[in-house]
Image: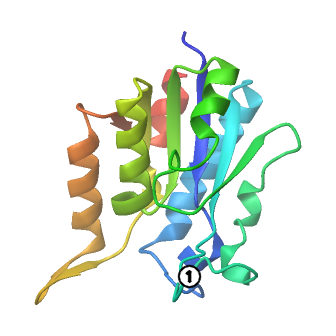
């Protein structure tokens, strides 16, 4: 077994129904992510909680000082866990994530969180570029409908397309239950 870290990305209030950037069915993803996080914590896996604070002028969500930027209460980092702040979709960009993983001797990441098509995708690809082995827990992530021109791509199709693109080339994609059973 290679040293592993469990990484929670952006499970923050703005992604829930009353938030500024509500996703499709974030509650189901949160339930699976919390179950997997509990398993990781109970089995001594290093846990890293990443929080996005959007400092860009004109930002519409994750704005500093708002309730929406706060972490979902089930994902608040414990005192012995790493809590990182990011300002871009990629959790490696201008953060100490890579240094922290190296300090911990981590070779494998298990990733859960929010927005599959943005922050999960960019972070997984960046991790693979840095030679980490990555597992994404598919049902512990969530996304939203996307629009391009006159077309609306439903969230379930966005989710399937992005996870399919990551699977094999950049990560192993499996459900939370599959990961728990395997771990």
Residue plotted at (71% across, 55% down): 75
Question: How far across and how far down the image is residue 179, in percent?
Answer: 49, 31
Q: Residue furthest right?
A: 79
- 92 left or right of 122? right
Is 122 in front, or is 57? 57
Q: Image quarter for residue 38?
A: top right
**Residue at 28% across, 66% down:** 156
Residue 46, image quadrant:
top right
In this view, which residue lies farthest toward the left? 150
Give coordinates of residue 11: x percent, y percent. Answer: 60, 62
Residue 129 is drawn in which quadrant? Answer: top left
Image check: 20 left or right of 125? right
Q: Tell me the quadrant of the picture where the N terminus can be found.
A: top right
108 to the left or right of 36? left
The residue located at (64%, 75%) in the rendering is 13
Image coloring type = rainbow
| 119 up-or-down from 23: above or below | above
Vertical position of residue 172 compared to residue 148: above or below: above
Residue 165 against residue 18 in the figure, above or below = above
Q: Is residue 90 above or below residue 98?
A: below
Which residue is label 1 attached to?
A: 61
Q: Give the image location of residue 182, x and y in percent.
A: 49, 22
Mark 1 residue crowding within 10 angstroms, few (<14) / some (14–19) / many (20+): many
Residue 84 point in image, percent of width and height:
69, 50
């Amino acid at each position: 077994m290679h040293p592993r870290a469990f990484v929670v990305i952006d499970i923050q209030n703005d992604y829930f129904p009353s938030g500024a950037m509500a996703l499709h069915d974030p509650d189901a993803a949160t339930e699976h992510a919390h179950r997997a996080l509990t398993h990781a914590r109970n089995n001594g896996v290093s846990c890293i909680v990443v929080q996005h604070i959007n400092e860009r002028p004109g930002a519409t969500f994750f704005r500093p000082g708002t309730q929406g930027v706060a972490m979902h209460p089930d994902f608040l980092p414990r005192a012995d866990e790493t809590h990182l702040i990011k300002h871009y979709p990629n959790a490696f960009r201008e953060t100490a994530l890579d240094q922290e993983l190296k300090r911990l001797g981590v070779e494998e990441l298990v990733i859960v969180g929010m927005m599959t098509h943005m922050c999960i995708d960019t972070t997984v690809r960046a991790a693979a570029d840095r030679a980490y082995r990555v597992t994404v827990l598919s049902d512990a992530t969530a996304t939203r409908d996307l629009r391009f021109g006159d077309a609306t791509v439903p969230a379930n199709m966005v989710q399937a397309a992005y996870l399919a693109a990551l699977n094999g080339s950049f990560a192993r994609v499996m459900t939370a239950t599959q990961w728990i059973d395997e771990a």
